[in-house]
Image (cartoon, rainbow, N blue to C red):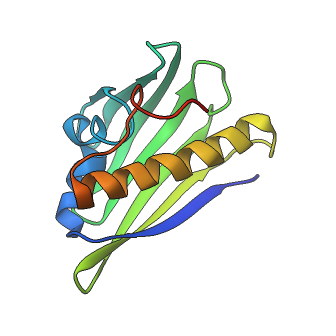
Amino acid sequence: MPDIMHRITIHTTPERVYEAIATAEGIRNWWTRDAAVDSKNGGAAEFGFYDHVFVIKASVDELTPPAHVGWNKVTSTHGGFDGTSIAFDLQPQEHSTVLAFAHRGFKRADDNYAGATTRWGYYLVSLKRYLEAGTGSPNPDDIDF
């Protein structure tokens, strides 16, 4: 099964990165403004895109502040994410944080996978810009893919 993996350095603390990826308030600044997250182990998360035309749902199963966020049992409106998992691993490095991102379990490397790879790269840069410069580009303020 193909996986999406990215690694970026963000010039801020792991605590700030963790808050940006583990809470709805944080996620609304870089990924999608339509985010609802029960930020506790066993909680539920729902992320809407393009006026809720595309929706991703996940189980919040792994929270280890400020080092790890894991979403499992991921599903999506069109089924392309069904059965996948998403993990954010944070490692402090001097005055920065290294974020290792993985979206695992795609059934095949098809157009859906290619689109997800592109979008995740874009949104992780949005996360970096939000934390370093104060402004990200979450949906619906993102670019037209």
- Residue 35, position as x, y percentages in the image: 32, 27
* Badge count: 0
Please name the residue shown 25% across and 49% down the image.
20
Looking at the image, residue 44 sits to the left or right of residue 142; the answer is: left
Please name the residue shown 32% across and 45% down the image.
136
**Quarter of the image where one finds residue 11:** bottom left
Please name the residue shown 35% across and 58% down the image.
128
- Residue 138, position as x, y percentages in the image: 38, 36
Quarter of the image for the C terminus: give it.
Answer: top right
User: Which of 4/118 is in front?
Assistant: 118
- Residue 102, position as x, y percentages in the image: 54, 57
Looking at the image, residue 102 sits to the left or right of residue 30; the answer is: right
Looking at the image, residue 130 lies above or below residue 13: above
**Quarter of the image where one finds residue 80:** top right
- Residue 122, position as x, y percentages in the image: 51, 48
Looking at the image, residue 56 lies above or below residue 21: above
Q: Residue furthest bottom?
A: 94
Looking at the image, residue 116 lies above or below residue 19: above
Please name the residue shown 39% across and 65% down the image.
89
User: Which of 17/61 is in front?
Assistant: 17
